[in-house]
Structures are given as C-alpha cells and as structure tokens.
Amino acid sequence: RKEVEQDPGPFNVPEGATVAFNCTYSNSASQSFFWYRQDCRKEPKLLMSVYSSGNEDGRFTAQLNRASQYISLLIRDSKLSDSATYLCVVSRSGYALNFGKGTSLLVTP
Amino acid sequence: SQTIHQWPATLVQPVGSPLSLECTVEGTSNPNLYWYRQAAGRGLQLLFYSVGIGQISSEVPQNLSASRPQDRQFILSSKKLLLSDSGFYLCAWRGSRSEQYFGPGTRLTVT
C-alpha cells in the first residue's frame, strides 16, 4: 500500500464550482498533515496545514479524520487561478514527509 | 524572512558527465535541508536530507551523493550521470511545524 494515495484526476470544473479532493495515508503514527499546490513546471508551495479539528483559509477548507486516516480539501467558488496540482502530504518518522502524487484540477471559464 | 536559492534553473548534460547542484538558504540558522527529485509525471522522491553540517542521510541508493559543507549550503552531486537521472530537482528546508519550503528547482535533462 502506498504511503499517501490520491485520486490523480483530472478534475475539470467550471468557475464558481465547489470541488473536493480526498487523500488516504497508511501510517497511523503520522502527526503532521498538509496540502501543497504545484503549478506546472514549478516548485510545490504550501497551501495549508491540516488540523484535527478542521481548518479554513478563505475559500479552502481542510479536514482530517485520524480514525479513517483520511484527509480532504474543499475549494469553494473555484477561480481560474486555482488550476494546479494539489499534493496531499503526511509526516513520517524522523524528519521526512511523504508526498502524494497529486490531484490535477482544471477550472474552466 | 527565509529564502531558498537553487541554481542553475535548467541544465542539459550528456550521459556520463558530472553534476553539481547547489542550494542555499537565507534567514534561518541550522535548518534541516532536503533534496527531492520529481521525474516527469511522477511524485516527489526524497533523495537526501541533512540535519546539520556534514550530516547526510540517504533515502535511495543511486549514483547521486550530497554534501553540506556549510550550515546554509546543500549540494547534490554525481560523478557520472545516467539517463534516468533526468528530472526536476528540488531543495527544501523544514519549518517549525514540520512543513517544508521549496526552492525554485533545477530542471535537469540528461542526453
């Protein structure tokens, strides 16, 4: 089983739509969780951390379910500029992170 | 604020040639530093990480090596490149909540 699994997509949605991405992880001892955004041919950039109680940053909402080892990202009112690949990231023992392969989002006019 | 630099931005090298990629971090001291590779259409693969000067941990056996000669400098090297070494090489430093921040990357094509 892969450490972090994501639906690769692509997700094609119209502007203004709400879209949700899901991610599962295998290491129940993981303590830190993140969503990153990666634009084409660019470096990944931290979008938001994910906390057990759930957290929101503007149009973005992240949820964590430790019992199910499941993480989600909800994007409301999608913008053209949200088109990117979204990476689910989970900490592992030591100093390292496990990155999912990403979910591709294309927001269309 | 912290910034991370990588160079060169792009590189085309023949098979069998040596490689040296450099990463420097500003605005933080004694950072944990990381080298990743992202092959075309693939996920991020951790290659090396370092918790301090001269301390290198290798994740995957391969023909690459890393060194940390100074606190804020991390170097990725190879004596002889293979075609399979092509990819997007990213350096990162670790923040206080275990998050990582990436440099702009070096896109390497081995021909």
Image (cartoon, rainbow, N blue to C red):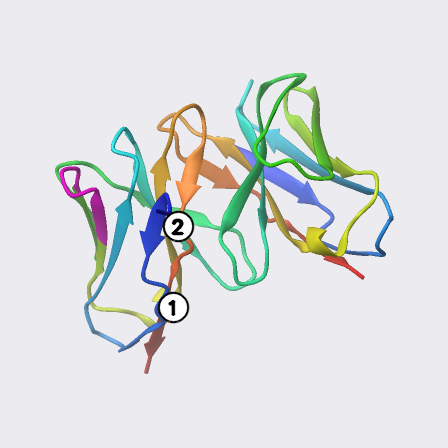
Is B78 inside the magenta-drawn segment? no
**Residue, x 47% and y 50% (percent of image)?**
A44
Looking at the image, residue A28 lies above or below residue B56? below
**Residue, x 37% and y 64% (percent of image)?**
A8
- SS at badge 2: loop
Q: What's the residue type where badge 2 is placed?
A: Gly
Residue B100 falls left or right of residue B87:
left
Nearer to me, B78 or A2: A2
Kindly indicate the quadrant of the structure image that contains residue A33: top left
The residue tagged 1 is A83
Residue range in magenta is A65-72
In which chain is the residue bearing label 1? A
The residue tagged 2 is A100
Nearer to me, B110 or B12: B110
| Relative image position of residue A19 (x, y in whole percent) | 22, 66
Marks 1 & 2 on one chain: yes
> Between disc 1 and disc 2, whose residue precedes?
1
**Residue, x 68% and y 17% (percent of image)?**
B54
Residue B13 falls left or right of residue A51:
right
| Relative image position of residue A62 (x, y in whole percent) | 21, 48
Q: Nearer the viewer, mark 1 or mark 2?
A: 2
Kindly indicate the quadrant of the structure image that contains residue B26: top right
